[in-house]
Amino acid sequence: MTYKEEFIRFLADCGVLKFGTFKLKSGRIAPYFLNAGEYKKGSQIKRLGEFYADCIAENKIEADTLFGPAYKGVPLALSAAVALYEKYGIDVNFCFDRKEVKDHGEGGMFVGKQPEDKEKIAIIEDVMTSGKALKEVLPKLRGAADVDVVAMVITVDRMEKALGSEESAVQQAYSQEGVKVYSIVTIRDIIRALEDGVIEGKEHVPAILAYLEEYGAKY
C-alpha cells in the first residue's frame, strides 16, 4: 500500500474515521466524521508523526521549524519533528504557543524555538474546517518576527466549501493568507480507499459523493 492508503487504514483502525450520520458544527449533516480525540496511545501519536513526515518529504516542504498551535497541534508538531529526523534525517526545530503569555520565568508567548526574521515555518494541524486556527496563529507568529510561513500540513482535506464561500478552508488559506496547505490525504483519497477495499464501508460511498455534490468546493 501507499503511505496514503496506510494512513486511511490507520484512521479507521484508530476509530478516528467514522461513517454514518453526523451533525457538524457548521450545521451540515455529513455521512462521515473525523474525531481526533480517538488518538490516545503513544504508538498512535508516533505513527501519526511519521505520516506527517511522509507528507512533508513527498511535497518537499522546506521548513526550519514545525509549529504546533496550542493545544491540539503541540503533540502533532513534536511527533512530526521526531519522525522527520528518524525517517529522513531532517533535523528541524519545533515551537508551540501558549494560550496566555507567561509573565514569569523565561516569559513569552512561545515554547521551543523562538521565531526569528526570515525563518521558514510549517504549521502542523489536525484538520481544517473553518480556518480559524490559522487566522488566530498567524498574527502571533508574524507579530513576533518577520517569519515566512511556507506551509500548513493537515491530516485530511474535506474539500468542502467554507460557510458563505465557494472556496474550501484550504483554498481560502492560500487566497486570503498566502499559506499553502498540504494534506496527508483528501476525502477523494478516502473514497478511492473505500471503493478499492482498503478499508470497509464501500456502501457509504454514494452518500459521501452526494454530500460533496452539495457542499464540495471546486478543485
Image (cartoon, rainbow, N blue to C red):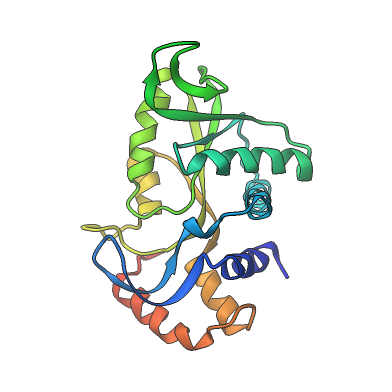
Q: Which residue is most to the top?
A: 105
Q: Is residue 76 visible?
A: yes
Above or below, 135 against 8 in this view is: above
Please identify the quarter of the rendering in which residue 216 is found: bottom left
Above or below, 167 against 196 in this view is above
Residue lying at 55% horizontally and 56% vertically, measured from the top left: 39
Estimate the x, y position of residue 8 in percent, counting from the top left. Answer: 60, 68
Total residue callouts: 0
Q: 73 above or below 27?
A: above
Q: Nearer the viewer, residue 55 or 108?
A: 108
Q: Could you tell me which residue is drawn at 68 percent across and 47 percent down?
A: 57
Left or right: residue 42 versus residue 95 is right
The picture places residue 125, in percent across and down from the top left corner, at 49, 46
Query: Image check: 159 left or right of 73?
Result: left
Q: Position of residue 113 (x, y in %)?
A: 57, 22
Residue 28: image quadrant is bottom left
Q: Position of residue 27 (x, y in %)?
A: 23, 66
Residue found at x 40% / y 39%: 178
Pick the quarter of the image with the C terminus. Answer: bottom left
Q: Residue furthest left?
A: 164
Mark yes or no: residue 143 visible.
Answer: no
Viewer-side residue, 189 vs 8:
8
Image quarter where the N terminus lies is bottom right
- Residue at x-position 35% and y-position 28%: 139
